[in-house]
Image (spheres, rainbow, N blue to C red):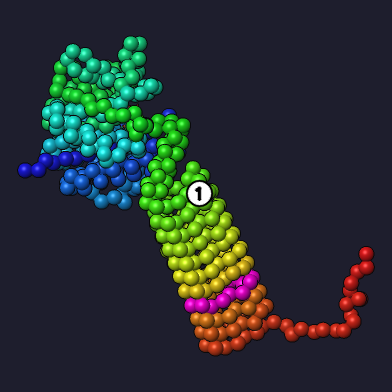
Amino acid sequence: MSESFSSVILAAGEGKRLNMEVPKPLAPAAGLKLIDFPIRELKKFSKNLNLKDNISCVVGHKRELVEEHISQYENVNTVLQEKQIGTGDAVKSYFLGVKDAKDYDFTLITCADTPLIRESHFQKLFSCLKDTKADAVVATFKTTNPTGYGRIVIGDKGLKIIEEKDANTQQKTIKIVNSGLYIFKTSYILDHLDSLNTNNQSGELYLTDLFQQGRNVTSCEFEDDGSFLGVNNPDQLDKVNTILRKERAAQLQNDGVYFVESRHTYLDYDVEIGRGTTVYPNNFIQSGTKIGEKCILLPGSVIKNTIIGKQTTIKPYCILEDSRLGDNVTIGPFAHLRPDSIVKDECKIGNFVEIKKTRLDKGVKVSHLSYVGDAEIGEDSNIGCGFITCNYDGANKHKTTIGKGCFIGSDSQMIAPVKIGDEAYVASGSTINKDIPDGGFAIARERQVTKEGLAKKFLKKK
Ligand code: UD1
Ligand code: CA
């Protein structure tokens, strides 16, 4: 019979030392939130062991916000810790709140504030528990700076964990510390949970008190490679963010992405980039973005939640938000795609062009100085320089539709709602407020008057 397993993420604490508006589990971590990391890694872990995800997050401080965020995940539930009176109490709340918590053979416990712990750590720790046949195992590491961590005190009768606040001078010098990651036989927790007490400097129930000398508990030491860095203050949050971005860049480099200078590219952790793409410095590539193969991102763009096809070039200083670009598109420099823009294959968007909630079909060109909002433009139409959709009447937005193969002269405006057929032609400088049928030609500007010799009357002499 296969073993059953459940995981608990402690996420109820206030995170006072971090001093942020948002609760600590929702502190930003390379475009995601701190708590996303343990959730994602635990999901990988159970998938690899071929087990169902049984993940619970203990929430408390600003719980509504944390719960709302967690609701995006399947098979991850939350349980309330009424008062944040310690990690031991958080685990008690879990066993009280989750009906079948007692039924799993093993319980893994980790914290919401250690986002660099990976699935491989869970695996190693689980093997260690099995190999040693212990009732509980804590992941430890040896560090030159143990400040803030619980110390692993080893004596004749095994190990115990002493929190920094409770450690004596000699214990404070111990360099082997508690990472905050544990795996227990569930029955062991249940046997000892009620004996936890608040006789310590913080007056809290410590989960770490489950590790006492004379019991069948052990530790598994990991290399101090930074993986257990806990986020308790702003400096640690900053460090973790840098490490996460670097980690993602390294993964992408391995997959064949070329960063001209990776340390000057600001990558969110969930960004995907295809093989053969080149990324120049000072691009901010943010959460939800997927970029295809063999693209070129020249310096200085901000790309957020945008899907980009292959062989597309983003020239310098563009802003792309919540949009989609096809293959072989060229955009920029200085272009702005606002949300819900769809730019199909082979389009060309040039300097100082703003596009919003618009679909450009294959091969459309909007090369210079234009605003295109709430519009649809058909295949191969060419939009001249300085074109404007007048989409807003002061109260409502209206739609502009332009057909295939049109030529829209420079400096024209379309007062929406308006519909232009296929292969229509609009003369430069026209203000169009009536529909134009397929193949129609429209001109809407004053006729030119030229008077010979009159210029000298107007030219001012210096
Ligand atoms: C904890 C450990 C310490 C370890 C360190 C590793 C205890 C007593 N100490 O200390 O030995 O070296 O982690 O990073 O466990 N939480 C709750 N409810 C509470 C209190 C905390 O859910 O009542 C959650 C927090 O949201 C956090 C986690 O538990 O995610 C750890 O709490 P924190 O206060 O950060 O503990 P540390 O002081 O870091
Ligand atoms: Ca912590």
Percent from the top left, x then y, of residue 414?
59, 76
Q: Residue at x 49, y 53 (%)?
A: 279
Q: Is residue 441 left or right of residue 69?
A: right
Viewer-closest of 397 and 27: 27
Establish if 302 lies above or below 16: below
**Residue 322 placement: quadrant:** bottom left
Q: Is residue 61 magenta?
A: no
In what quadrant does ligand 1 lie?
Answer: top left
Q: Main secondary structure of the magenta part?
A: loop
**Residue 157 placement: quadrant:** top left
Viewer-closest of 58 and 289: 289
Percent from the top left, x then y, of residue 303?
48, 55
Q: The residue under label 1 is which amino acid type? A: Val
Percent from the top left, x then y, of residue 168?
33, 12
Q: Is residue 384 magenta?
A: yes
Q: Is residue 256 left or right of residue 384?
A: left
| Residue at far left of view | 1
Q: Residue at x 48, y 70 (%)?
A: 346
Residue range in magenta is 379-391
So how many labels did they put on this image?
1
